[in-house]
Amino acid sequence: MGIAASAACCAVEGACCFCSSLTCCARLCGCCGGGGGGGAKGYPEGAGRIGSLILMMLSLLVAISGQYWYYDYMTDIPGAEDAWTDGCKDSSSRYPRCREYAATERVSFAAACFFAFMAMLSGFMPPIHDHGWDIKVISYIGFLITTIWIPNSVVDNHGYVWFARVGSFGMIVLQQVILVDFAYTLNEKLLALAGDTVDEMSSWLYALLGLCFTNFAVSITGIVLMFLYYTDGCDDSTTFVSLALIFIVILTVLQLTSDPEHGHNLLVTSVVSAYITYLTYVGVSSNPNGSCNPNYSEDETAVSVILGLGITFISICGTVYFSSRSMTNLLDGDVEQGKRSQLNAVLTGGATSNPVNAESAPASLNSSGDPNTGAAADADTTQDAAGAAAYQASWGAAMNDGGHAMKFNIAMMLIAMYWCMVLTDWGNVDRSSSGASPTNGKIAMWMNITASWICVLLYGWTLVAPRIFPDRDFS
């Protein structure tokens, strides 16, 4: 009972610490995102996105900690032993892997449910996305603690894991669409900046050619290095790298022989080629066969485990941050518009403006222009009224966000499923891996290779479709 009480106490104190940290961060994000100065508190614009990202990254940290540390103490909590030993007895051949994964799956399940619920709420009342983070955090922590007593069968490959597999695969497909679309948009923007120069090359055309050359150079170098270091004695890795090279050549030939009027260009092919090379590398480097994977390590020393988990945490956090925005834009149906505005700002040095902030900024100025005059009280009253009006305007704008908040939370739900699959080899408890190589596994290898093939099919279709259906408009 002493051990159980200590474990329960640690769990409660850890939850309180997590809750307090996230609440403080969410409040800070609310102030930075749109908190007004003076007497009127501004609309917390951006608090929903920043708070959600912080919650997701902290949840990821809790999941990794559970998978490699505290999972072994969960059976000491009163009433939780049956839940954590469900299909995962100490004598089972899948132990301790099944219990390690159960910790990650519980956190992912809680995060996915939280964002699914927030998506429904945001669909009816979009401003909820930015407000009430104290209540949100307390509710999330409460639900997360409740999952301690949920049987493994609810979250493992008998239940939640199958939903997570489908959601993660959907996220992978969305990412391929985003990549191809972004490459087309980037090419169009660079050509537009170059203008109608025919007799001489502009700096923008040189930049475009430089990007093409760099991407192809990276692809060729990556293919060669993978042949040298990742194919020794492994037929599957050799096949994957060979297919990547063949696909790159086929796509390049299709693009060079296509009609330029359809928008086909060498830049998109080079970007897709580099991405195929990257995914192939991630796939072969996930191979749990150490004889043909120099990255794989079974030496679970403290340094190797911490280094492996640290790299995994940083890479997944990067995926969370960048995917949350790009996937939301895609679900909004304004990928091209969003990318164009970002490219305009990056390539031309322009700055994007926020209409809500532009309207509310003047309202925060002191109307007297001199804080030392006798009209300071009247100025404060005017400022409060202006701040309240700006807040109401921001609330009205949030109510008509076109479902953006709901789609953002859907994207976050898919991301919560995705990192769970990355950490658990897509729910495969029979895999062979080590703490020093936490993302290695046969299924992880196949999923990354499959993702590269999906990218080939998507881009290949954009090259072939105009030839198969010449009467259709593919511009």
Image (cartoon, rainbow, N blue to C red):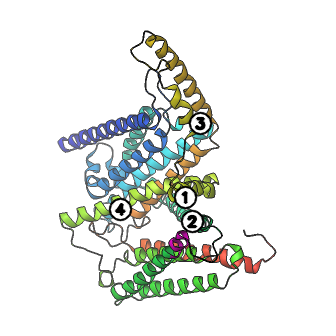
**Neighbour tally class for label 3: few under 14, some 14-19, many 20 plus, Cα within 10 Å:** many
Q: Which of pointers 3 and 4 lies earlier in the amino acid sequence? A: 4
Q: Quadrant of residue 402?
A: top right
Task: Report the mark closest to the observer, 3 or 4.
Answer: 3
- At label 2, counting other C-alpha atoms closer than 10 Å, the crowd grade (few under 14, some 14-19, many 20 or more) is many
Q: What label sits on residue 98 in the rendered view?
A: 4
Give the residues in magenta: 202-209
- The numbered mark at residue 32 is none
Q: Residue 36 at x, y = what percent?
A: 46, 29
On the question of residue 132 being in view, the answer is yes
Q: Quarter of the image containing the C terminus?
A: bottom right
Please tell me whether mark 4 or mark 2 is closer to you in this view. Answer: 2
Give residue 186's mark: 2
The tag earlier along the polypeptide, 1 or 3, is: 1
The one nearer the camera, 256 or 181, is: 256
Q: Please name the amino acid that badge 3 sits on.
A: Ala
Residue 375 horizontal/vertical position (percent): 46, 11
Front residue of 128 and 205: 205
Disc 1: which residue: 343
SS at mark 4? helix
Q: Is residue 276 visible?
A: no
Asked if the residue under mark 1 is in contact with the one under mark 2, i.e. CB atoms within 8 Å, the reply is yes
In the picture shown, does residue 288 fall above or below 422?
A: below
CA gap, disc 3 and disc 2: 30 Å
Q: Residues under labels 3 and 4: Cα distance? A: 43 Å
- Eye-nearest disc, 1 or 4: 1
